[in-house]
Amino acid sequence: PHRLLQDNSPVVVDEWPPGYYLTDDLTDHAIEMLRSSKASDPSRPFFLYFAHGAVHAPLHAKAQDIAKYDGRYSEGWDALRASRFAKQTELGILPEGTQVAPRNTERGNDVPPWDGLQPEQQELFAKYMAVYAGMVDNVDQQFGRLVDALAQMGELDNTIILFTSDNGASREGEVEGTTGYYQHLLGATDLDADLARLDEIGGPTTTPHYPRGWAMASGTPFRLYKINTHQGGHSVPMIVRGPGVPEGELRRQFAHVTDVLPTLLDLLDIQAPTERHGKPLKPVAGTSFVATLTDG
């Protein structure tokens, strides 16, 4: 990263250490904060808000994580969307009778059939998705480290964990993707240059983003993408676990980030403050979805 802030001050770094990766570094700091908090006062509750830089563009991943997915996406986004829809149906994530949305065909949002692409395009586009997958993989690894740290501190079973995202998959790579994200945002495209940098994609000499066909697959079974008001733009997964949260249950009701605070208050059995510095506060926005979680 070109700039990091800590406690409202820039972090001055003369040189990044070999192998530096932002998600690892942020996780190190998160674990350090938790351990420091519990060491200074074991009885004091903590709240940790951890916003990853991943998997926002530009897409960068460790070489070993990218290698795990080499060849994984060579069948293309149409096959991936079909297989994900089948798996979602098998797992019961989708209500019975759900149909996958048709291919995005709106002008400016359309996705070409994978089988209609040239072989060199398919190779390039599959590499973009392998980088994205490696980036997600690392988030999973680092989240595991965070959970392990909570377990080592004896706090895992006393901690409510909420994992979610802010929007649907991004279509900013447009039809062909790019190895130069910032130039691409200005409208510059150069497929030949991207092909020439195939082996560099995901490393520090590129700023890649994948084509929007992968965003369509990531949004299965919905339509369209981030910035659209369709479900592919605004619907995201959310996982909640911890004391008072039923295990292994699926809830389909619409929830919004404003529902999180009142839900946590209910789970913790505490009342929202009614005043601050002697001045009355407005009621907490949102509606708790705990009642639905616990009452079915």
Image (cartoon, rainbow, N blue to C red):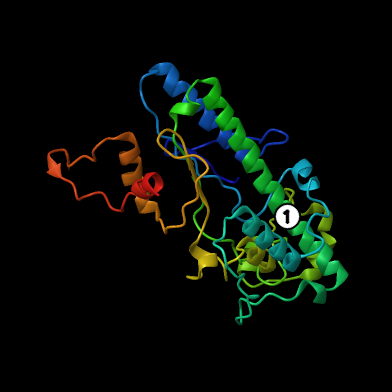
* Residue at mark 1: 206
Nearer to us in this view, 79 or 53: 79
Q: Is residue 114 left or right of residue 207?
A: right
Nearer to us in this view, 122 or 223: 223
Does residue 13 appear in this view?
Answer: no
- Quadrant housing residue 213: bottom right
**Horizontal and vertical percent for residue 47?**
40, 34
Does residue 133 appear in this view?
Answer: yes
- Residue at 75% x, 75% y: name it: 113
Q: The N terminus appears in which quarter of the rendering?
A: top right
Q: Is residue 190 above or below residue 266?
A: below
Nearer to us in this view, 25 or 55: 55
**Horizontal and vertical percent for residue 107?**
61, 82
Q: Is residue 243 left or right of residue 239?
A: left
Label 1, residues with CA under 10 Å away: few <14, some 14-19, many ≥20: some
- Residue at 53% x, 28% y: name it: 31
Nearer to us in this view, 91 or 130: 91
- Residue at 78% x, 60% y: name it: 126
Please state the total of marks drawn on the protein image: 1
Q: Is residue 203 above or below residue 26?
A: below
- Quadrant housing residue 97: bottom right
Q: Is residue 189 left or right of residue 260?
A: right
**Horizontal and vertical percent for residue 197?**
81, 58
Q: Is residue 66 above or below residue 95?
A: above
Element at label 1: loop
- Residue furthest to the right: 119
- Residue furthest to the bottom: 107
- Residue at 62% x, 42% y: name it: 139
Amino acid type assigned to the residue bearing label 1 in the image: Thr
**Horizontal and vertical percent for residue 3?**
55, 44
- Quadrant housing residue 217: bottom right
